[in-house]
Amino acid sequence: MADTVREIERKYEVDGGAQLPDLAGVDRVATVAEAGVENLDARYYDTPDQRLAADAITLRRRTGGRDAGWHLKLPVAPGVRDEVRAPLSDAPPPELTALVRSRVLDGELVPLVRLRTRRTVRVLHDAAGAPLAELAVDEVHAQRAGKPTEGKAGAAGVRWREIEVELVEGGDSGLLDEVGRALVAAGARPASSESKLARALAETGLARERPARPGGGGGESRPRGSGKRGGEAMAAKNTTKTGKNRTTAGKSKTTAGKKKEPTAGDVVLRYVREQVRVIIELDPAVRRDLPDSVHRMRVATRRLRSAFRSYTKVLDRSATRPVGLELQWLAAELGVDRDREVLTARLQQALAEVPRTLRLGPVDARLRIWSERRRTGARREVLSVLDGPRYMALLKTLHALLEAPPLRPAADRPASEVAAGAVLKDYRRLARRVEAALAAPAGQARDEALHGARKAAKRTRYAAEAARPALGGPAKKFARRIKRVQQLLGDHQDGVVARGALRELATQAQQAGEGGFTFGLLYGREEARAADRERELPRRWKKASRRKHRAALRP
C-alpha cells in the first residue's frame, strides 16, 4: 500500500573539504543533534528516452536508511515534491507505475542510474527540543545502471558532495531561507541540478535532449511557416486606434526592433499543448483523489475539444473530430463523480438554510447515504477508465497530433485576424441560442434551450481565452463578460439537476416511511431560484453583448 509524504527541501553543492557552519542560533534553531550515518543504494528507473526525467519525475528503488522501498517523486512547486512510497519489491510496483502511466504510456521502465550515498544526518531543534528540519550531508557516487561500458563517458562513475535541508511536516519554509543563507555564507552553492538524478544523468553522459512532450518546453513542434514559436513572439505590444493595448508584434511584417506577429498556428497550438499538458499532469492527481483534480482534468478536456471546434480554419476538422469525440467520452466519464460532488454540495447548502422546525425526518442522513452510494461507484469507474485501453489510445493520439499537427493554410496567417474571426463566429452562435432560450415557453423547453445556451457560452469563452496571446486585453475582458453569462446559465442548469435529485430523494423518503416534506420544500426553492435566473438573464446578456465589446476584438 502506497503512502505519501510532502517533501520541502533545498539542495546545495559543497566542495569535498568544506565544513558546516554552526547553525545554532539561525532563525529558531537552538541545537543541532547528530542523527547518525546511513548508507543508501538506489536505482533510478525511467523509459530509455527518459520520459519521466523530462517532467522532473523520479522513480527509484532504494535500500538502506529508514525508508527503504520504492519512491516516486512528483513535482508540486519549486523545491516541493510529493514522495509516494511503496514497500520493496523486485519490479516497480503497480500502485506507482499507474501514477506515471500518462507519461510512460506503453514504454518500458528500466534502471538507468545507480546512486550510492553515504549520508550524515543532523536534526535542527528549537528551544523546546522539537525538530524543525533535517540536514543531510551526502557523499554521492553515481554510475550507469548495469555493466560498465569501457570508453563511455561516466562509465567509471562520478562523485560529488551535497547538502540537503528538509523541513519536518508542517514546518515554516522561512527557516529554509535562513539556513540557506548561513550555508552560502560558509561557501555552499545552491544546487545547479534539480535533483541527484538530473546531475547523475548529465555527468554520466546519459542526459538526453528532452523528447517532444505535450505542453513541454524541450521539443515543441513548430507550426509550418512560423519563424518563432508562439511563446517567443507574443510579448511585444502595439496600440489600437482606441488606445487599448493588444498583444501583437507588427502585423506579420518584420520592422526594425519589432518581433514578428505570431501566426494563428502558433497561438492555437500553444493553447492545445497547454490543455494536453494539464490532462497528462492531472492524471496522477485524479488517481490519488486529490481535491479538485477531477474537475480540472475535465475542464481541460472540454477546453481542448472546444479549441478543435472553434479553430477549424487552423486545425483540420476531419483529423480533430474523432479526437474530440474521445475527449467528450472522457469528460463524461470524469463528470459522473464531479457532478455528484457539485450537486451534493448544493443540496447540503440548501438544507442548511432550512429552519430546524421544517427539517422533518432524517433528511441529512438520507442525503448523505444517497451521495455516498454514488461516490463509491463513480470513483471505481474513474479508475477503471484511466486504466483502460481506450484512455491509453486517446493519450497516444494526443501525442501524435502534437507531433504532426493537422494544420490548414490559415495557420500561417496572422493570429489576430484568425482568432478574432473564430471568437466572433462562436459569439454569433451563442447569440442565436440565447435569443431562442428567451423566446421559449416556460418549462422543459426553456430549460433545455438555456442549457444549450450555456454550452455555447462556454465554447465562446474558451475561444476568447485561447485568443488572448493574439488579441490581448480585449479578449480577456470579453471572456470575462461571457463567463458571467455562463455562470448564470450554469446555476440555472444546476437547479434543473437539483430538482430531479430532490424528486428522487423525496420518493425514497416516502417509500421508507420518512415523509418527503423537506425535500419538497427544497424543490420549491429551486424552482423560485431558477425563475430568478431567467429574469436576470436579459439584463446580463445585454451587458455582455454590447457591440463595442465585439468591435474591440477586431484587428
Image: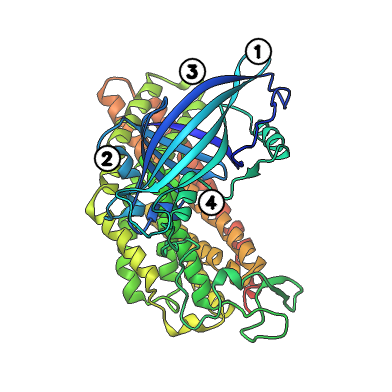
- Residue shown at the point (56%, 76%) measured from the top left: 228
| Tag 1 residue | 128
- Residue shown at the point (50%, 26%) measured from the top left: 352
Which of the two residues, 289 or 183, is positioned nearer the viewer here? 183
Amino acid at dot 1: Ala
Residue 50, how many percent across, how many down? 38, 56
Mark 1 and mark 4 lie on one chain; the one further toward the N terminus is 1
The kind of secondary structure element at disc 2 is helix
Amino acid at dot 2: Pro
Q: Residue furthest front?
A: 150
Q: CA distance from mark 1 to mark 2?
A: 42 Å
| Tag 4 residue | 488
Which of the two residues, 113 or 325, is positioned nearer the viewer here? 113
Amino acid at dot 3: Thr
Residue 475, how many percent across, how many down? 61, 67
- Residue shown at the point (65%, 31%) measured from the top left: 20
Which is more foreground, mark 1 or mark 4? Answer: 1
| Tag 2 residue | 94
| Tag 3 residue | 357
The kind of secondary structure element at disc 1 is loop
Q: CA distance from mark 4 to mark 3?
A: 31 Å
Q: Which mark is residue 487?
A: none
Mark 4 and mark 3 lie on one chain; the one further toward the N terminus is 3
Residue 201, how many percent across, how many down? 44, 53
Q: CA distance from mark 3 to mark 1?
A: 51 Å
Task: Tell me where residue 512 sits by quadrant.
Answer: top left
Q: Are marks 3 and 2 in contact (CB under 8 Å)?
A: no
Which is more foreground, mark 4 or mark 3? Answer: 4
Which of the two residues, 95 or 377, is positioned nearer the viewer here? 95
Amino acid at dot 4: Leu
